[in-house]
Image (tube, rainbow, N blue to C red):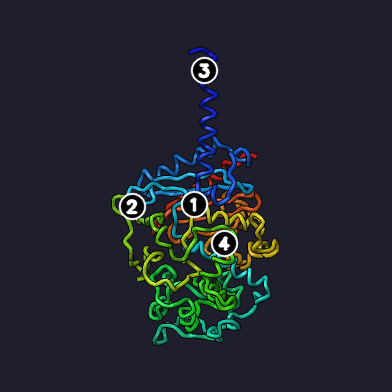
Amino acid sequence: MSMKQQQELKLASAMLRVCLVAFLFCASPLWAQGLSRAEPEQVGLSSERLERIRPVMQSYIDDKALAGSLLLIARHGKVAYLESFGAMDREQGKPMREDVIFRIASMTKAITSVAVMMLYEEGRFLLEDPISKYIPAFEEPKVLVPNAEMDAGYELVPAKREITIRDLLRHTSGISYGFWGREHLHELYVEAGISDGLTQTEGTMGEMVEKLAALPLIGQPGEVWEYGLNTDVLGYLVEVVSGKSLDAFFRERIFAPLKMSDTHFFLPEDKLARLAAVYRPGDKGIERLPETEQTVLTAVFSTSFHYSGPRTFFSGGAGLVSTIGDYTRFLQMLLNEGELEGTRLLSRKTVEMMTVNHIGDLDTLDPGRAFSLGFSVHNGPGVSGRIDSTGTYAWGGFFYTDYWVDPEEQLVGVFMAQLYPWNGLDAQDKFRVLSYQSIAD
């Protein structure tokens, strides 16, 4: 082959690659949702260093620690990395794809918190208002104090003050989760039929919140950080104040404006084939999780929660399913200080207030993280030993999903998989390190 022919072949090959990339971008769900893409170098990332992600993440698939995962990195408002690994459903032979729908569980909390702050901006309430002003059942709360000398093993003492809306946003209300197994409180939650938002639940969130309000708190409001059903109460607050179901409020005020067309409490039948299967660790690697699983703490959750059974219970703390594209649009809105593509949900000052430490020195069981109004907030690499910037806000979900937003680096990361329990799996942490090490500007 002559030198001229070799040059022509190289040129034709390069043109083919350009056309293929253009076709894939235009055909992909993320492109259709309007998320811009960029070559890594265009946003200050190194393509060569991003290549380190694949062998590390593929090793979790090869070792049968994960069935599949979908990873995204966006910087300066553009998606620079989006890769899939393994399968969304091994048994059915379905590979992981960009449009797979995941149970995002507690990643729902950020969306509910934004809904609350939208109503706050409309003057519907103040954050220091007692929640009982809008949900009277929370008047005169009691606090559970263990006491071995009492017949029940505990006594109830009056709360020093009422629970505020800000307490619920920052998880300082004293409301817990039943599945934590807190002494005595767990039994009370089970007896009352309190749902954690991961179960097939009859009735409505309002009915559950009324039962929850009658139960004691694990600590004095404002004096203890306790991750719990706070955001489910906030979801009901949205319903009370707006006069709409949480489902309708999300669809009309958040999902439609942000073009989040694949985010739902309950999946339409035509989208069921895109819902990823959930797996759990087994003796020979992961195995498919049964539709209904009984945990060691007797909390029951259902992997079919989002497509069968009653469809009246909208959990603001754990109820949504979504795609990586939809959720990235939501996170980019926050990173853009409340706005996306000309649509503004929140003011810059509100997002600023939402994403700073609101709990002071209260213990979150993680010295590297404080808590804001809906997210954890990074206290800094020198405290945590983690690579992300001070002020990064983040959270994850029950089924091994995770996200972070770093305003300093203008970076968004999203990790999607479906696994429970995780048993200390470190894939999410390594993905974050591998993301940051690719920064080259």
Q: Which residue is mark 4?
A: 256
Q: Residue at 35% of width from left, 66% of height from top?
A: 295
Instruction: Tell me the amino acid under the disc marked 2.
Output: Ile
Query: Which mark lies nearer to you, 3 or 1?
Result: 3
Q: Is residue 15 left or right of residue 57?
A: right
Q: Which residue is mark 2?
A: 286
Instruction: Tell me the amino acid under the disc marked 3.
Output: Gln
Query: Which mark lies nearer to you, 4 or 3?
Result: 4
Q: Is residue 379 left or right of residue 51?
A: right
Q: Residue furthest right?
A: 349
Q: Which residue is mark 1?
A: 415
Q: Residue at 55% of width from left, 62% of height from top?
A: 255
Q: CA distance from mark 4 to mark 2?
A: 37 Å
Q: CA distance from mark 3 to mark 1?
A: 42 Å
Q: CA distance from mark 4 to mark 1?
A: 24 Å
For mark 3, give the secondary structure. Answer: helix
Earlier in the chain: of badge 4 and badge 1, it is 4
Q: Residue at 44% of width from left, 47% of height from top?
A: 97
Query: Which mark lies nearer to you, 4 or 1?
Result: 4
